[in-house]
Image: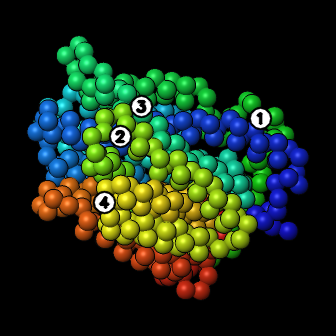
Amino acid sequence: MSTITSSPAGNGDLATAIRKVKRHIMPLFIIMFIVNYIDRVNIGFVKGHLETDLGIGTAAYGLGAGLFFIGYAIFEVPSNLMLQRVGARAWLTRIMFTWGLVAAGMAFIQNETHFYIMRFLLGVAEAGFFPGVIYYFTRWLPGSERGKAIALFLSGSAIASILSGPISGALLQIEGLGLHGWQWMFLIEGLFSCALCAFVWFWLDSLPHDAKWLTRAEQDALVAEIEQEQREREAAQTEKSSVFSLLKDRQIVLFCLVYFSIQLTIYAATFWLPSIIRNMGDISDFQVGLLNSVPWIISIGAMYMFASASARWKFQQAWVAAALVVAAIGMFASTTGGPVFAYVAICFAAIGFKSASSCFWPIPQGYLDARIAAAVLALINSVGNLGGFVAPATFGFLEQATGSIEGGLYGLACTSVLAAIVVFQTRTKPGAGDGHHPRIMSRAAA
């Protein structure tokens, strides 16, 4: 019987190893993702402050917010290739330290040019973190466990969205030593990332056989299970896999398109939701932060329910499509009423776009050969994250030119519907109709 479909519980050492791995790495990765996400999106809370203190207008803000994703996209694949070369512990620690330094450096920008440069450099520094963690799972968990691990890890972004509002709102109240509140926010949140990377270095191990907290029998059982999955994939292949050959594969293009659509909506909401909340009335920075948390609190429960349902009723594409339709309805509804109704509608949309993100990754993971999975997951993530450039840049231009972001919200609704259709063309395993190179793909990621 295939080990890919067998239950890990059938092997005592394997089951124990999996439980230990989850307890050891998942809390740290979730914390890292929370800190990472806060440093990436905290500019959403200082839009007005940057305009008042530095003269950075709406269009410049949108462009700067999006430039992060250009740096991220350019260096994503090279970063993940370096992770494979030097090891996960060293490279993930390096990523965290450099992004913390750049995030703290945002406190000292003085004009639009500085803003653009630092946002681009923050993207360069963070490049490789998310797909690096996803690849880490392929080295430490059997295929049957990865979908749940990814959903749990992705909950970190929702938790970060909950925490970032109150934390950033509180830090914005600090004044002193010649620094404004927005400068203290950048400085404290960035330096916290630098401090945390010391713990990351001592806690993480690159491979199961490096883990002293696993017994030798547990290490061997875990490695044997993952290697067996890879051998089964290799036996099914008749052509040699390569990253360059995958660029011609229709499935990879579809994965990129779907993920781009998901990220487009997520980052439009992330960067513009605080501004929508401010339009609801005379609200303080701290109150904006609290209200900003609500959609993401709702999305955590939704992500778990979608992940559980997709694990029980297995048709991953259908669950992604359903989530995208929910996002489309919410985004469209946000244009039909006042600021309060728009806020409620985006709370509903968050159920869809966050659940779509967590349900999406098992699809390409199940399609890729483990030997090139890191680079291709990085490619999908980097292309998809360009939505993080397009959304804020477009919304900033629209608001400055027309005084409204309504057209952008219509566009997001249409994009989500189209992505819901496209996702049914994707495959979780190679077969007829997969594209130019159906045989170079594998049955599941290792």
Mark 4 sits on what residue? 338
Marks 3/2: CA distance? 11 Å
Q: Tell me the kind of residue under disc 3.
A: Ile
Res. 288 mark: 2
| Front position among marks 4 and 1 | 4
Residue at 44% from the left image edge and 47% from the top image edge: 128
Q: Which quadrant of the rendered structure holds the N terminus?
A: bottom right
Q: Tell me the kind of residue under disc 2.
A: Val
Determine whether label 3 and label 2 are within 8 Å by CB.
Answer: no
Res. 214 mark: 1
Q: Tell me the kind of residue under disc 4.
A: Gly
Residue 7's image quarter? Answer: bottom right
Q: Tell me the kind of residue under disc 1.
A: Leu
Mark 3 sits on what residue? 167
Marks 2/1: CA distance? 45 Å
| Front position among marks 3 and 4 | 4
Query: Where is residue 400 shown, x and y percent of the image?
Result: 14, 56
Determine whether label 4 and label 1 are within 8 Å by CB.
Answer: no
Image position of 437 with respect to 217: above or below: below
Q: Earlier in the sequence, mark 3 or mark 2?
A: 3
| Left or right: where 53 falls relative to 228 | left
Q: Earlier in the sequence, mark 2 or mark 1?
A: 1
Looking at this view, is 52 or 29 the one in front? 52
